[in-house]
Image (tube, rainbow, N blue to C red):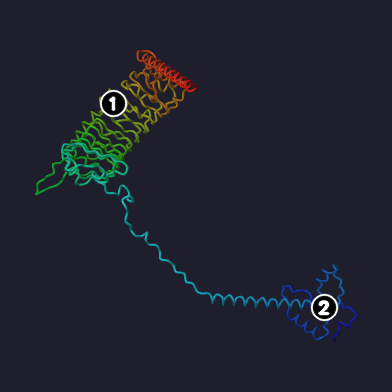
Amino acid sequence: MTTDTENDPQPQIADGGDETNNSAPENGIDNPTATADTSAAAEAGEATPVAEVTAETEEAQKENNGSGVPFLIDTAESLTINDDADADDKKGAEEEETATNNNNTNTEGEANEEESKPIIKKVVPPLPLDWTKMAECNEEDISPADQIRYPWDVMDIPLPPDQSETQFLIVGTAGQKITRMGSNLCDYVSENLTHLVLRSHLIRTMEGISKLKHLELLELYDNMIDEIGDLSTGQVDNGEEEDDGLPAKNLRVLDISYNVIRDMNPVSQCLNLQELYIAQNKIKSIRGIGQLTQLRKIDLGANRIRVMEEEELSGLINLEELWLGKNKIEHIGGISKLTKLRRLDVQSNRLTSIENLEGQVDTLEELYLAHNGIDVEGAKCPTGLALPFKQLNTIDMSRNRLTDTSPFAHLTSLNELWISGNDIKTFDDVEYIRSLVELDGVYLEYNPVASDFEYRKKLVEIVPNLTQIDATMVGGIAQHGYLTGGGSGDNLLERMRQMQDQVIRKAAAETETETSVSKVDDE
């Protein structure tokens, strides 16, 4: 049965069903079917059942009256509200449709605009490959070691050379360094040349000296030479040897220090060599000197030598100076037959003891053993400092592990004793050198004992003859007669007085001159 809601004067009570028109669905999406049906019924003027229009849920009732009691709803007002909601839904749907159409229109318009735009193709430039090509370098761009520069390029050499000249010397300077000696060097120097010095250059190869038959001194100090060569011709013609061993046989001094030489064996050709300097190279073993009986001095310092080869050293019967500092030697040896040795340098190695010096008891004068690991017991070895050296006047054992001066107590010939940088703590440890009446200078700095306030005074009391302590004169210059006592001191004081008087007179004269000038100006 249908009822016209507009003519019904009585309000209706909604039953407990769910609200179908006023409340939104749980998922937030409107029900288009219900909305369409309600709208159609309203337009047709048909009555709508109250249960379908005004149903309220129990939950909604509680929210409205707070007690859950059913409440009355004006049917006409409810329908009006529903109609307004339907109108809003329609309007929203139309707006959404319009917006969708507009978006589609805009998208199509943008697509048409993009189609109408001209297509621009990007052209990728070719890769820059010029940097991969070898460019021509100027001489300034080449490193100094790779440039080709001969002796005659850095020095004006008259041609033909003066045959009376016996020395040829060029010391390298910035921008004027020789890189090649030249195989034809003999064409630019005198054939009577005896001294050839090419110091501090960038020479890599020894060449051009095999025809210098009279050469006695060859110095190639501070270069880049990696091999000793060209010391003789080594040529054979028609089965007969033309190699007379020159200039190697005439060489007396050979200095090839500060290079990169690894093998020293070629020096065996220099049978009359007296001085050999091969310091600061890359030599690992002593070779080629066993037959050099004329050798008096050899410097092999700053290499990589570990062993003092007896086979090589024992033949140096005339050797006076042996320098082996800055190597990796652990034991002194191989020098028992060097009975003329006066100076021995094995500092900055790996020694822990002093030994095998029996052959030098009568000749050794200077012994340098600084920067090792020698302690008191190692210094007292029976074949070391315990021997009664007769000529030993200088010992350098700085930077070792000494705790007292007992190893030197019997060395009465000592003039200088360098034992700085050890572990000598008290003056009782220094007392052992009281007997060294010839001791003139002692270095004890950087020992704990040197921190004593009266260090110098007490040291002089132990060794009264000291004139120098740690590179400082004992008592200053006054005690040595420079200012007082003796004729020299009196003369010095007299000269100082004269100079003082002269300065005073000069100042007085200048004052008088200034005064007279000012008076003239005033007039």
User: Label 2 to label 1, Cα distance in Å?
Assistant: 132 Å
Name the residue that disc number 1 marks. 365
Residue at figure coordinates x 33%, y 51% from the top left: 141
Q: Is residue 223 visible?
A: no
Quick check: 495 left or right of 177?
Answer: right
Residue 447 x, y percent position in the rendering = 43, 27
Residue at the extreme front: 523
Q: Nearer the viewer, mark 2 or mark 1?
A: 2
Q: Which mark is residue 80?
A: 2
Q: Can residue 335 be seen in this view?
A: yes
Residue 377 x, y percent position in the rendering = 37, 28
Q: Residues within 10 Å of mark 1 (few under 14, many from 20)?
A: many
Instruction: Check disc 1 and give the amino acid type.
Output: Glu
User: Which image quarter: residue 322?
Assistant: top left
Q: Residues within 10 Å of mark 2 (few under 14, many from 20)?
A: few
Residue 51 x, y percent position in the rendering = 83, 80
Instruction: Check disc 2 and give the amino acid type.
Output: Thr
Asked whether 206 or 312 is in front, the reply is 206
Residue 209 lies, with reference to residue 48, above or below; the image says above
Q: Considering the numbered disc 1 on the image, is that residue within a helix, a strand or a loop?
A: loop
Residue 37 lies, with reference to residue 319, above or below; the image says below
Residue at figure coordinates x 73%, y 80% from the top left: 32
Name the N-terminal-most of marks 2 and 1: 2
Asked whether 463 or 145 is in front, the reply is 145
Residue 249 x, y percent position in the rendering = 16, 38
Q: Considering the numbered disc 2 on the image, is that residue within a helix, a strand or a loop?
A: helix
Residue at figure coordinates x 82%, y 78% from the top left: 80
Asked whether 243 or 488 is in front, the reply is 488
User: Which image quarter: residue 218?
Assistant: top left
